């Protein structure tokens, strides 16, 4: 299995504060992995680096074979548009816009013709079980349905990697379980899924967990080993 995410000795500093301290991890293509840690542990910073939303202070971040440090801002934007999808705790859907248009608009920067975007949006909504709600606006949908629209938007363009940041945080237990089932189905269809969460019960849905605390990976569940700053313990 080839690595789709490869971080080596990554540090991220904000002035005198080190948010990440020598993080090294690899995620194979097609894996379902959870990054789990408490508030302030560095998991959101790690998401920003893996999602090419930010650059490391030092160390190497490779996403789908691309060294983030070597890419221009325009190249990073293109990489995100073509290879990466995001789902957040807040749904970030445009109010007053139908579900199908919310999903189609998520592909604006992929160079896909409008008619094809709508075709893909329809297929993506059907895939998440919302074929009967395509013309409904966010205020006409339940929280679980809105998160399904967000997942459909993130995956309509067939990204290689899906980052799900606390995707069940605003949902009740039933809707949250439905979203986790959906993420599992997407993973079985070939999407690499990175779940970021503070909830170990939610993280247990992923076959592999990385635990993070104080800016360092403390455990990789696939090996049972902790990680010291900059390398294996």
Image (spheres, helix red, strand yellow):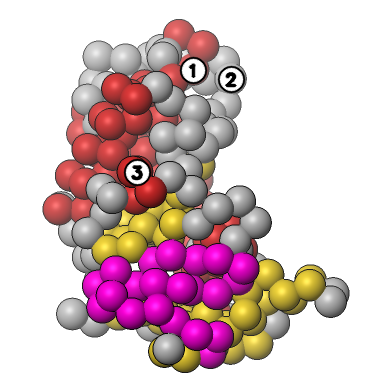
The residue singled out by tag 2 in the image is 95
Mark 3 and mark 1 lie on one chain; the one further toward the N terminus is 1
Mark 1 and mark 2 lie on one chain; the one further toward the N terminus is 2
Mark 3 and mark 2 lie on one chain; the one further toward the N terminus is 2
Q: Is residue 155 left or right of residue 111?
A: left
Query: Which quadrant holds residue 52?
Result: bottom right
Q: Residue at x 55, y 66 (%)?
A: 213
How far is mark 3 from mark 1, CA to CA? Answer: 25 Å
The residue singled out by tag 3 in the image is 202
Q: Residue at x 51, y 11 (%)?
A: 139
The picture places residue 109, in percent across and down from the top left corner, at 51, 52
Q: Is residue 160 left or right of residue 186?
A: right
Q: Nearer the viewer, residue 107 or 39?
A: 39
Q: Residue at x 69, y 82 (%)?
A: 57
Q: Nearer the viewer, residue 214 or 43?
A: 214
Q: Is residue 40 left or right of residue 29?
A: right
Q: Is residue 36 magenta?
A: no
Which is closer to the viewer, label 3 or label 1? 3
Identify the image quadrant of the C terminus. bottom left
* SS for callout 2: loop
Relative height, residue 43 to residue 129 (above, below): below
Determine if residue 150 is in view. Answer: no
Q: Are marks 1 and 2 in contact (CB under 8 Å)?
A: yes
Relative height, residue 4 to residue 167 (above, below): below
Residue 138, numbered label: 1
| Range of magenta residues | 210-230
């Amino acid at each position: 299995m080839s690595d789709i995410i490869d971080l080596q000795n990554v540090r991220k500093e904000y002035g005198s504060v080190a948010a990440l301290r020598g993080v090294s991890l690899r995620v194979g293509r097609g894996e379902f992995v959870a990054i789990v840690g408490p508030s302030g542990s560095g998991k959101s910073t790690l998401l920003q680096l893996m999602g090419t939303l930010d650059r490391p202070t030092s160390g190497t971040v490779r996403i789908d074979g691309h060294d983030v440090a070597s890419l221009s801002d325009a190249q990073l934007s293109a990489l995100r548009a073509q290879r990466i999808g995001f789902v957040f705790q807040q749904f970030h859907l445009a109010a007053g816009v139908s579900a199908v248009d919310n999903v189609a608009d998520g592909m604006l920067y992929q160079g896909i013709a409008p008619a094809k975007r709508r075709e893909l949006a329809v297929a993506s909504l059907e895939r998440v079980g919302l074929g009967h709600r395509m013309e409904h606006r966010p205020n006409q949908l339940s929280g679980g349905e809105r998160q399904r629209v967000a997942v459909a938007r993130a995956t309509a363009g067939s990204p290689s990697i899906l980052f799900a940041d606390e995707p069940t945080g605003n949902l009740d237990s039933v809707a949250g379980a439905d979203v986790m089932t959906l993420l599992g189905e997407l993973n079985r269809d070939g999407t690499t899924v990175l779940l970021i969460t503070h909830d170990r019960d939610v993280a247990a849905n992923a076959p592999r967990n990385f635990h993070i605390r104080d800016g360092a990976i403390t455990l990789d569940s696939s090996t049972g080993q902790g990680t010291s700053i900059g390398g294996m313990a």
